[in-house]
Image: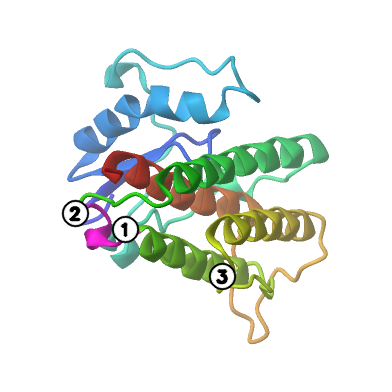
């Protein structure tokens, strides 16, 4: 909960996260995107059950937001993300993250060569601009796991998306299995693997849906 914006996210379902001016608006937005999220993950989790109203949602934790929250990103780490990650859960999170990247890949492919309608979403970026923004953000997200990205930011769109997908999954596995440090070179705190999945999945789905909504 920030001063100007609130995010609501499903703890067990990374990528299913929406925002609003306040808690009620954020919960309603989360609920309204449930079917859309369900379609993203239906091949790996067809059993996902959706609430019928926001009153059916159970809030497990409220967190105080920060400047990142008000800027427009879920920047506070839920307590549950510190839980240990066994192999089964790692595989599940990797599959969910992969599904979110695939949704972005499909959105980019479907919009290739088509104009995106101008408007407040995306600040009027064209498809190349959205893709570049996602690539720049993903590089920064990988750094929060102490992963040095080798993604070719000049690659063609679909190749770039595939590189980002592969690097995200490789970095997640390396972080979860202890092959990456838990602290930065100067002692700075890095992201835990669960939050990495949550943040990346939210970001790529947010822009996948933006592209779908704006394609001409």
Q: Where is residue 147? Give x, y as percent.
A: 69, 71
| Helix, strand or loop for disc 2 | loop
Residue wearing tag 2: 118
Residue 135 image position (x, y, % from top left) = 51, 65
Q: Is residue 5 magenta?
A: no
Q: Position of residue 2 (x, y in %)?
A: 25, 55
**Is residue 132 among what the camera can see?**
yes
In three-dimensional space, the C-alpha distance between marks 3 and 2, rounded to whole angstroms, equals 26 Å
**Is mark 1 in CB contact (under 8 Å) with mark 2?**
no
Of badges 1 and 2, the one in the foreground is 2
Nearer to me, 38 or 122: 122
Q: Position of residue 211 (x, y in %)?
A: 36, 46
| Labels 1 and 3: the sequence-earlier one | 1
For the residue labelled by badge 3, is the local secondary structure a helix, a strand or a loop? helix
Q: Tell me the CA gap for discs 1 and 3.
A: 20 Å
The residue that mark 1 highlights is 69
What is the distance, in whole Å, between disc 1 and disc 2 at their CAs?
A: 25 Å
Q: Nearer the viewer, residue 61 or 177?
A: 177
Mark 1 and mark 3 in contact? Answer it, CB < 8 Å.
Answer: no
Foreground mark, 1 or 3, reads 3
Q: Residue furthest front?
A: 113
Say which residue label 3 marks: 139
Region rendered in magenta: 121-126
Please indicate, yes or no, whether residue 8 appears anywhere in the rendered image. no
Dominant SS in magenta = helix
């Amino acid at each position: 909960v920030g001063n100007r914006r609130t995010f609501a996210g499903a703890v067990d379902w990374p990528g299913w996260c929406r925002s609003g001016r306040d808690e009620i608006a954020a919960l309603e937005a989360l609920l309204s995107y449930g079917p859309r999220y369900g379609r993203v993950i239906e091949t790996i989790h067809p059993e996902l059950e959706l609430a019928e109203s926001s009153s059916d949602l159970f809030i497990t934790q409220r967190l105080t937001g920060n400047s990142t929250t008000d800027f427009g990103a879920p920047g506070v780490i839920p307590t549950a993300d510190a839980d240990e990650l066994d192999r089964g859960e790692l595989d599940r999170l990797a599959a969910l993250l992969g599904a979110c990247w695939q949704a972005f890949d499909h959105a980019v492919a479907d919009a290739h060569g088509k104009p995106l309608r101008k408007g407040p979403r995306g600040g009027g970026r064209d498809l190349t601009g959205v893709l570049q923004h996602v690539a720049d953000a993903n590089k920064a997200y990988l750094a929060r796991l102490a992963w040095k990205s080798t993604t070719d930011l000049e690659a063609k769109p679909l190749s770039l998306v595939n590189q980002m997908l592969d690097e995200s999954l490789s970095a997640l596995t390396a972080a979860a299995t202890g092959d990456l440090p838990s602290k930065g070179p100067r002692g700075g705190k890095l992201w835990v693997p669960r939050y990495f999945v949550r943040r990346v999945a939210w970001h790529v789905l947010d822009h996948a849906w933006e592209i779908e909504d704006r394609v001409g």
